[in-house]
Structure formats: structure tokens, C-alpha cells
Image: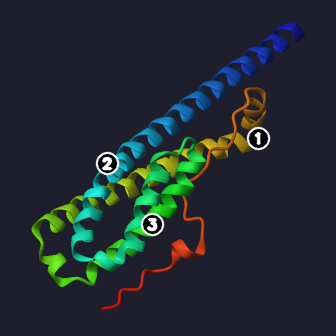
């Protein structure tokens, strides 16, 4: 009788262990899928930015510092190799884009240019895609991180070396500030 009880406990533990491991694998794969989907939207943004910058450059030649900082931030984000670097560099790019949007608002002729308006509309849609992708990514990462850190999942996470994943978040006070538009 005791043997059956011990055997039943072992079977339950093995089933729990396998189930927990599979849960981690599913969440890890969902996290990678969410990051990949966000990466596609970011790539669209990176491809669109040079066109946008060139259009603004034609109207705002003396705003070269802003335009250069946007392109530098874009290139840094594009060439990021890790998720942590991509998140940090993309946050910097988002801040420089806010400055570029502020510059573009100061030029009435630019705002009337059809090419500029189309580029701005495309960029706005891509920004909305990116925001949605970030929300989905953060939701999946939050579930993964919670499972990694809570008992008894942390036991399986420790055995198989599942580590916390980075959230996509605003990392500096400067990025939290609104861009000031002056005419």
C-alpha cells in the first residue's frame, strides 16, 4: 500500500515537472514570436525613416542636428544584436522621432506636401503597430517572468536555466517628457 502511494506521488511529480517544463517552452516560444512580430514592425519603421528624413531635410536644412540624431539612433537600433540593446536603442530612436515630429510641425509648407503627408501617415500607422506589438510582447514576457520567479515554477526555471526576459519600457525621464513644439 505504501509503495502505491509513493509511486502515485512520484507519477504526479513527474507529470507536474513535465507540464511545467512544457509551459516554460510554450511561453519562451510565444515571447520569441512576440519579439519577432515587433521586430518586423520596427524594420518597417527603420526603412521608412530615411525617406521621412529626406523629405523634412528639403524644407528644414538648418535642422541638421535633429536629422542626424534621428539617423544615428535609427542605425544604432537597426544594428542592435540583443533584445536589451534593441529595447534601449529603440527607446532612444522614439525620443529622436518625437523631436523630428516637432521640427516638421514648424514648417507649414512641409505639412502641405503630399509626399510628406503620406510618409507621416505610414509612419503613424507603423508606430501604432509597434505600440500594439510592444503591449503583446510585454504581456507574454510578464507571464514568462512571473512563472520563472514564482514557486514552484522557479524550481524548474532554475534547473533548466530559464532567465527573466526584458520588458519593453521607457527607460529614462527624458523619454517620458512631452516634446515641446514652438513656432
Q: Dot 2, crowdedness within 10 Å: few (<14), some or many (≥20)?
A: some
On screen, residue 142 versus residue 130, left or right, reads right
Q: Whole-Å distance between the Cαs marked 1 and 3?
A: 46 Å
Q: Quadrant of the N terminus?
A: top right
Disc 2: which residue? 44
Report if residue 142 is visible in the image: no
Of the two numbered discs 2 and 3 in the rendering, the one whose residue sits closer to the viewer: 3
Q: Position of residue 41 (x, y in %)?
A: 35, 48
Q: Residue at x 52, y 31 (%)?
A: 29
Which residue is found at the position 18% from the left and 84% from the top? 108
Which mark is drawn over residue 69?
A: 3
Specify the quadrant that holds the C terminus: bottom left
Q: Earlier in the sequence, mark 2 or mark 1?
A: 2
Task: List the residue tagged with mark 1.
Answer: 151
Q: Position of residue 138 (x, y in %)?
A: 52, 51
Give above or below for 58 relative to 8. Answer: below
In the figure, residue 150 lies in which quadrant? top right
Q: In the image, 91: left or right of 124?
A: right
Amino acid at each position: 500500500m505504501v509503495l502505491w502511494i509513493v509511486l502515485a506521488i512520484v507519477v504526479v511529480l513527474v507529470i507536474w515537472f513535465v507540464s511545467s517544463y512544457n509551459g516554460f517552452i510554450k511561453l519562451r516560444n510565444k515571447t520569441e514570436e512576440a519579439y519577432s512580430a515587433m521586430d518586423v514592425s520596427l524594420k518597417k519603421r527603420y526603412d521608412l525613416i530615411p525617406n521621412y528624413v529626406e523629405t523634412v531635410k528639403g524644407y528644414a536644412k538648418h535642422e541638421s542636428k535633429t536629422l542626424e540624431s534621428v539617423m544615428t539612433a535609427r542605425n544604432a537600433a537597426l544594428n542592435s544584436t540583443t533584445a536589451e540593446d534593441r529595447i534601449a536603442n529603440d527607446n532612444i530612436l522614439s525620443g529622436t522621432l518625437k523631436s523630428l515630429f516637432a521640427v516638421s510641425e514648424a514648417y507649414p509648407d512641409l505639412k502641405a506636401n503630399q509626399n510628406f503627408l503620406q510618409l507621416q501617415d505610414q509612419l503613424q500607422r507603423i508606430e501604432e503597430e509597434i505600440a500594439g506589438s510592444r503591449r503583446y510582447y510585454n504581456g507574454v514576457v510578464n507571464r514568462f517572468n512571473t512563472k520563472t520567479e514564482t514557486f514552484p515554477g522557479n524550481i524548474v526555471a532554475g534547473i533548466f536555466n530559464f532567465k527573466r526576459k526584458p520588458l519593453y519600457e521607457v527607460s529614462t525621464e527624458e523619454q517620458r517628457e512631452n516634446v515641446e513644439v514652438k513656432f
